Image (cartoon, helix red, strand yellow):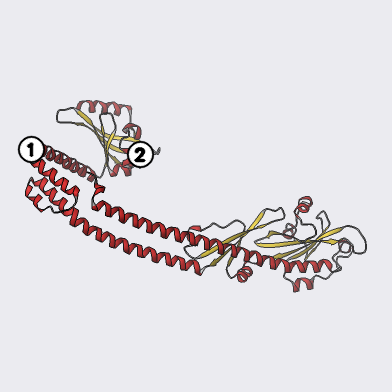
Amino acid sequence: MKLFRNKIAALIVLSSVTCLILVAAIALMTSISHRKIYETQRIEQSNSLRLSIELQARQQDRFLKSLAAMGGLEPCRLLNDSSAIDTRSIFSLNYVLFIAVTDPDLVPVKLFPAPEQGVLELLPDDHKAFRQFRSEGHITRYYAWYHESLVRVQAVDIPWCRSANAGGGILFAGFPVSAQELSFLVQGKAVLTREPLEKKAGNEMQMGIVSTELPLVGWRNLPVASLSLETTSDLLKGLSRFRNRLILLLIVIGLISILLLSVYLIRHFAWPMKMLNLAIRLKDPEYLQQVDSGDTDIKAMHNLILDAFSQEKLLSEIVRRRSVENLNAFHAAILSQIPDAVYSTDRNGIITYWSRTAAELYNVSEEDAIGAVADELIQSKWISKDEHARQKTHFENDGLMHGKMLQERPDGTELSVEASVTRLLDCNGRELGQLYIARKI
C-alpha cells in the first residue's frame, strides 16, 4: 500500500514542510542579523577601547617628554648628585608609579622613589631584546604586572649629559592601568586579567551583551594581560524579543495545524480504521458497512477484508498471526515487569531480548545489545572452578543454573550478581536458546 498517495500523507508532508521552512527562516534570519550586528558592535567597541587606551597613553607620553626635557634627570648628573632633581612635586601632581633612569645597557642609574625589588622587575633585563622591541625615535610602551596591579611602562631616550656628546640613557616611567577608569570612559564593564576570560558565546547575543577582548603585550612582545570589555546592546535585546515572538507565533500556528490535522485524521482515517479492525477481530463483516472514507488506501483495505472473509484459509492465517503477535507482546510485557535484569539468546548465543533493567545494569542500550553475542558482551565467571563444574553439570541435567557469579561490563567494570540461566525449549523439546536473569548483590 502506498501511503503517500492519500490525502493524509499529503497533508502531513505539507504541514511538516511548512513548519520546517518557518523554523529555518526564523533561525537563519535571526542568526544572520544577530551575528552581523554583534560583529559590527564588537568592532566598534574594540575601536573605542583602543582609542581610550591610546588617549591615556598619549597624555602620559607628553608627561614623559616633559620629564626628559627637564634638567636634572641626565644620568651623568644623577651619578654625581643624587638630589639633582626634586621628584616630590612630580609624584604629587601626576599619577605615576615610578620613574627610572638607566644607561643604554639597561643598568639602573637612579630609581624614584627608593628602589624596590618589585619595581626593578618591571624594567627589561635584556638590552638586546629590548632594543629590537623599541621603536626608534618614538616612545616605547609595554605592560607588566606589579603585584596584583597592571602597569603601563613607557620609555624614551634621554641624553647622558646635555653639555657633552657622551651618548645617552633611557628614561622609564610607570603608570597604573585602572579598569574602573576604562569602564567609565567607554561606558561598559572592563576587566583586567592575567589570562583570557572564558567566553560565553552561547548566551552573549541572546542576552544582548557585546564583549571584546584586547591582549596587552610586554616588552618581549608577548601578551602579559587581557583587557575584556562588556557592554549591553539594546538592539540585540530587541532582536531577541522579536525572535521569541516569532517562535511563539509559530508554536500557535503549529498547534492549530495539529488540531486540524487531528480532526481530519479522526474523520477520514482513524474511524474507518477502527471499523476495519473491529471487523477483523470479531469476524463480523457488518462493521464494514460503517466504513465511509474517500481515501483510496482505506477502500483497498475494505475490499481486501471482504475477500478475506470469503477465504477461510486466509482468514484463519490472519487470526493465527494476530494471536501469536498478541501472545508475544503479552510475554514481552510480563518480562518487562520483572525488576531483575532479563535477556535471552538463541541457540547460537545471539541476544534476542534485552530488558530495560538489563540496559541499566550493564550500561548497554537495547539497540546495542540486540544481535550481539552474549558471552562477548558480558564476560561471566563463577566464583570458583568447583562451582563452575557443579553448575555446568546441573545445567546439562536439568537445564538450569543458579548462583553467584562475577560479571564484567563492556566498559571494563566488574559487578557481583546472583544469576539464573534457564534453557528454553519449544513444544517439541528442541532447544530455542537460553534465558538469563541477573540481580546485582
| Residue contact between numbered discs 2 and 1, judged by CB atoms under 8 Å | no
Whether residue 210 is situated above or below residue 369 in the rendered picture? below
Q: Which of marks 2 and 1 is in front?
A: 1
* Residue at disc 2, secondary structure: strand
Q: What amino acid is at disc 2? A: Leu
Image quadrant in which you'd find residue 328: top left
**Which residue is tagged 1?**
312
Whole-percent x, y for residue 353 in the image: 26, 38
Residue 260 lies left or right of residue 240; in this view the side is left
Residue 78 lies left or right of residue 45; in this view the side is right
Whether residue 196 is situated above or below residue 230 in the rendered picture? above
Which residue does the image show at 59% across and 56% down from the upper left? 196
User: Camera-side residue: 430 or 34?
Assistant: 34
Image quadrant in which you'd find residue 309: top left
* Residue at disc 1, secondary structure: helix
Image quadrant in which you'd find residue 73: bottom right
**Which residue is tagged 2?**
415
Instruction: Using the numbered discs, state the Cα–Cα distance from disc 2 to disc 1 in whole angstroms.
Output: 55 Å
Whole-percent x, y for residue 276 in the image: 13, 48
